[in-house]
Amino acid sequence: MNRSLSTPWTAVLLAFAWSAGPAPASAQTVETYAYQPDAIYQVRAGLGITTQIELSQHEDILDYSSGFSGGWEISRRDNVFYVKPRNVDVDTNLLVRTAAHAYIFELKVVATDWRSLDQARAAGVQYKIRFGYPADTRFAADAASAPETPAELSTAVDPGRHYHFRYDYTQHRRTPHWLVPSTVYDDRRFTYIRMGDRGRFPSGNFPAVFARDNEDGDEFVVNSTVEDDVIVVHGTYPFLVVRHGAHVVGLRRSAEP
């Protein structure tokens, strides 16, 4: 991976500002929604608080996207999503597509200036959302939508395959060293971001990854999984943004030789 710094890309990467709103006072911190096709599910969040969204363990998640990805931290581990607003006035939607179902969420910031968790809960903040499903719900996908096999998601470099290793990165001078990937490469189907031991991260969680179609374009969520110390992004993109809290690193895929 080439460790070069692109000034325009750096300026675009760092020039983001984020912004919350009111909500109902009678909400449960742990709430179960009954799944219904095309229903809209409310997610009431608070600044500085993570909300967990747990889908059925039988769901095969294909992709997801939010309308204002820059205003939220959104990460996924298997069938569980974690969402946290970055600032106020960032209400948006989140769409999740699985092999069998589609989910529509409205992400709303309902607590911004709370001084205790009791106040945040009183404002309606949800800590966890889970789903109940009708008894006849089917989760099995057809063969075309089957999960990738472990071999396809192997992070080991196979001498018999062709890889693209030409990635540049840019970072703010205050970016902690633990957020800078040790290696980035792709096989033109998956992008592999090797981060090292997750114990290096303050929260123990890997960062979230977003993509851009061009240098100054809007960020959007990408489907990713974690294999040991590697974040596997499903697909290749000209620009990727790695975020962990307030810290950010930009990755740029160089042209094919």
Image (cartoon, rainbow, N blue to C red):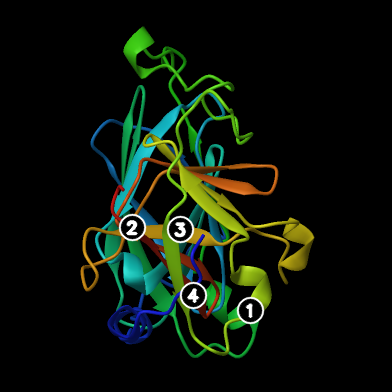
Residue 248 tag number: 4
Q: State if disc 3 and disc 2 touch (CB < 8 Å).
A: no
Q: Note whether residue 17 is visible.
A: no
The residue to which callout 2 is attached is 254
| Residue nearest the viewer, comparing 213 with 39 | 213
Tell me the amino acid under the disc marked 1. Answer: Asp
Q: Position of residue 131 (x, y in %)?
A: 49, 37
The residue to which callout 1 is attached is 118
Query: In the drawing, does residue 225 fall left or right of residue 164?
Result: right
Residue 7 tag number: none
Mark 1 or 2: in front is 2
Q: State if disc 2 and disc 1 touch (CB < 8 Å).
A: no
Tell me the amino acid under the disc marked 3. Answer: Val
Helix, strand, or loop for circle 4? Answer: strand
Give the Cα separation between the discs numbered 4 and 3. Answer: 10 Å
The residue to which callout 3 is attached is 209
In the image, residue 11 sits, relative to residue 86, either above or below, namely below
Q: Give the mark nearest the N terminus, 1 or 2.
A: 1
Give the Cα separation between the discs numbered 2 and 3. Answer: 18 Å
In the image, residue 183 sits, relative to residue 191, either above or below, namely below
Q: Residue at x 37, y 49 (%)?
A: 222
Helix, strand, or loop for circle 3? Answer: strand
Tell me the amino acid under the disc marked 2. Answer: Ser
Helix, strand, or loop for circle 1? Answer: helix
